[in-house]
Image (cartoon, rainbow, N blue to C red):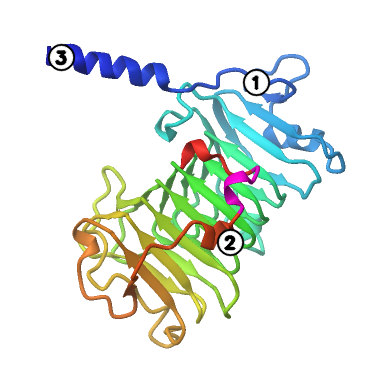
Amino acid sequence: MIPYLLALCLNLCLALAASRTSAPSGALVVSKAPAKGQYSKIQDAVNALSTSSTTAQSIFIEAGTYNEQIYIAPRKAALTIYGYSENTDDYSQNVVTVTQKLSLNEVATDDLTATLRAWSTNFKLYNVNLANTYGQGKQALALNAAAANQGYYACKFLGYQDTILAQTGTQLFAKSYIEGATDFIFGQHGLAWFSYCDIRVLAASLGFVTASGRASTEAGYYVLDHCSIAAKSGASVPKGAYYLGRPWGDYARVAVQYTTISNVVNAAGWHVWSTSEPNTDHVSFGEYGNTGDGAAGTRVIGTKLSKAVAITDVLGGGYASAWYVDKAYL
């Protein structure tokens, strides 16, 4: 009876899993073997779209690895990019990867290193892996989220230092995978909510998950909600090697709540920016309802919150009806 019930449950789950294996109506198509009217590069498809039209736009990417950097210029229309997926709820089944390896050794700004430079408001990305494979030593972004009202769903973000720049505007990251070692969720002015994300750290003797550069009492805030923080599968990470964050700016603000934290996180939880420039006078590092070995310890800089941060504090009171928010992932 028990094996029968398990099989029934598995079949039900598979039946409920949504797929997206063909292009939505009206979408431009990118393929490794493009047919007539399709594109071989994602950037070419983006460039084919009007930046002045107000009609909603979409791009569908067929399975494959695309070696390129993508720049999404500001536009009047909402834009959605979909990756081919047989299970849109599960980033581990993604089959579309965009990769390159620019770093600050080759270009002048963080933005110019990013695999995806998203400068347009009202933008959504589904089931795409973004990788910057430069590795250790210099800033090398997978994503620069540089505008308001952006949503990233069941995506993977792979880097080492500065993987995700949530620089300005409001962003939602949901059911995604984020990998790095040094300040790999960072920025100055962004309001970013990370929901049900798997945050994985690489082999390192010292590392930091977040680096908030908030420099005043402005609105900037990063919240990790119902996430998990642990070593990447197969990575050898010493116990206590990582910290939840350090303050790039003197008003840094980050909260970690309802999150499972493994022992890769140090008992101190949070770290100064540097010994010569601690940046701790006005920081707001908070935790609430976390579990796991890394959730315990004496937090010298951070504090235990009296209640969880509400999603409306980050995304605003009308978030549930906002176009870029896909409630199916929350």
Mark with earlier residue (3, 2): 3
Q: Which mark is residue 298?
A: none
Residue 322 percent across, percent down from the top left: 64, 46
Disc 2 to disc 1, how far (Cα)? 38 Å
What is the three-letter code of the residue carrying label 1? Ala
Quote the CA–CA distance across marks 3 and 2: 56 Å
Label 2 environment density (alpha carbons within 10 Å; few <14, some 14–19, many ≥20)? few
The residue identified by callout 1 is: 23
Q: Amino acid at mark 2?
A: Asn
- The dot on residue 105 is 2
Q: Residue at x 55, y 18 (%)?
A: 21
Q: Secondary structure at mark 3?
A: helix
- The answer to whether residue 190 is visible is yes
**Residue 149 vertical position relative to residue 34 in the rendered view, above or below:** below
Q: Residue beneath label 3, please?
A: 3
Residue 165 place in picture, x, y as percent: 56, 58
